[in-house]
Amino acid sequence: MSDHLTKILLSEDQIPTHWYNIAADLPISAPPHLHPATQQPVKAEDLAAIFPPGLIEQELSTERWIEIPEEVREIYRLWRPAPLYRAYRLESALGTRARVYYKYEGASPIGSHKANSSVPQAYYNKLAGITRLTTETGAGQWGAALAFACSVFGLACDVWQVRNSYETKPYRRMQMETYGATVTPSPSARTETGRAMRERFPDTPGSLGMAISEAVEEAARDPHANYSLGSVLNHVALHQTVIGQEALLQLESVGERLPDHIFACTGGGSNAAGISFPFLHRNLTAGANVRVVGCEPAACPSLTAGEYRYDFGDTANQTPLLKMYTLGADFVPDPVHAGGLRYHGMAPLVSAAYDQKLMDAVAIKQRDAFAAGVLFARAEGILPASESNHAIAGAVAHLQAAEDDGDGQVVLIGVSGSGQLDLPAYADYLSGQMLDA
Ligand SMILES: *Cc1c(COP(=O)(O)O)cnc(C)c1O
């Protein structure tokens, strides 16, 4: 392996041709989503009011490999394959003898991994003759990803943004509007659920659960509109597996072995699924022993402090029941929490993997997350997203505690996005104003 190779690239034709579906390989099948009225496993027709056939098929699929349409790979080529870096300067800053790599998803047009799913979601909706997509967004990354994908495929995009973020984080809204999306603060007066929430909780900062309810209601009402979700669901986890497949190939291409540890941040679980499932595939089918650690915020700790049970994906209880680690569908995170990753539940496939002890999880406090992010930025130059800082902090804590200075270990970190639009949170941290939630 070259001594001074820091950035490991693949050629464009090494973009994966298939998504990897871990549902095919889980030792115990993931519990099915349930219809809330009948408590029976959801069927394709139950989902047809808000999702297109292509995505419903993926949501319910247990096929191991699902082909990526050429039209989607064409758009992926704008930023994929995404770079993998050897973090030489972070290694020296930490004084570790481990070999540390990070997979960087911040080079996509919208600055995060979310475009890996927004593009196929827009594609399958376009294919089904849908003309408008509705969605929710917190800080705005998913809204921006969907707005970008809708602009690529000529669909209208209608985004409900959690009110607190809409008011305090204007740049993502500007980004969404630049791509042509309509952005409405949630809860809003546009939907029945929004009006009910505003009556019950006049001063609510909003939550992802409420915004999902509004976007679902609107999509169900309009036959030309569908709903789109940026994390949590099986088809979203599926789309993100391009991350881990590329990382596998990149490590191989420089003669590196499989990582001992992978650290990924977990909000709804999609980037963690994406980077780790192709490695878990090796664990499950080829006797590999890669340890995966989901790094979640201490302020929203669904894996480490939630319950594994059926719960709704939204506040108004309109979604199917999902078996997941959850803090409860009415959970509203403390607004002092700046690190993103605020969703109450965890992707059913990630939850199943965690329940079956195929992965670990740690909870990270936000000042530790930002301390690691600042260390990383000063060493590597790349300014990570607030969310990604949790993964970096998990890896840093592990490396600092490692015996023998980590000699011989290989560590892979998922850096899910760029922090260019998270600078106010960095400023709070640097000025000592960030609370240690
Ligand atoms: C949305 C987001 C996350 C959290 O979502 P997951 O589904 O858990 O991946 C993490 N990192 C970035 C950069 C994000 O935009």
Image (cartoon, rainbow, N blue to C red):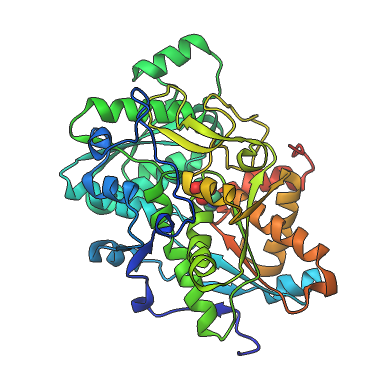
Depth order, front residue of 306/417: 306
Depth order, front residue of 436/273: 273
Depth order, front residue of 219/352: 352
* Residue 418: quadrant of the picture: bottom right
Q: Is residue 70 left or right of residue 391?
A: left
Q: Is residue 208 visible?
A: no
Furthest-bottom residue in this view: 2
Provide residue 295's location: percent of width, then percent of height: 64, 51
Residue drawn at (61%, 55%) of the image: 359
Residue drawn at (44%, 42%) of the image: 31
Provide residue 267's location: percent of width, then percent of height: 56, 44
Provide residue 81's location: percent of width, then percent of height: 42, 71
Provide residue 202's location: percent of width, then percent of height: 52, 12
Q: Is residue 412 left or right of residue 90?
A: left
Q: Is residue 140 left or right of residue 300?
A: left
Residue drawn at (54%, 24%) of the image: 330
Q: Is residue 53 left or right of residue 4?
A: left
Instruction: Answer above or below: position of 30 versus 381.
Output: above
Instruction: Answer above or below: position of 54 versus 302.
Output: below
* Residue 301: quadrant of the picture: top right
Q: Is residue 79 visible?
A: yes
Furthest-left residue in this view: 129
Point out the image quarter for the C terminus.
top right
Instruction: Answer above or below: position of 266 versus 193.
Output: below
Instruction: Answer above or below: position of 161 versus 78.
Output: above
Count the marks: 0
Point out the image quarter for the N terminus.
bottom right
Furthest-front residue in this view: 28
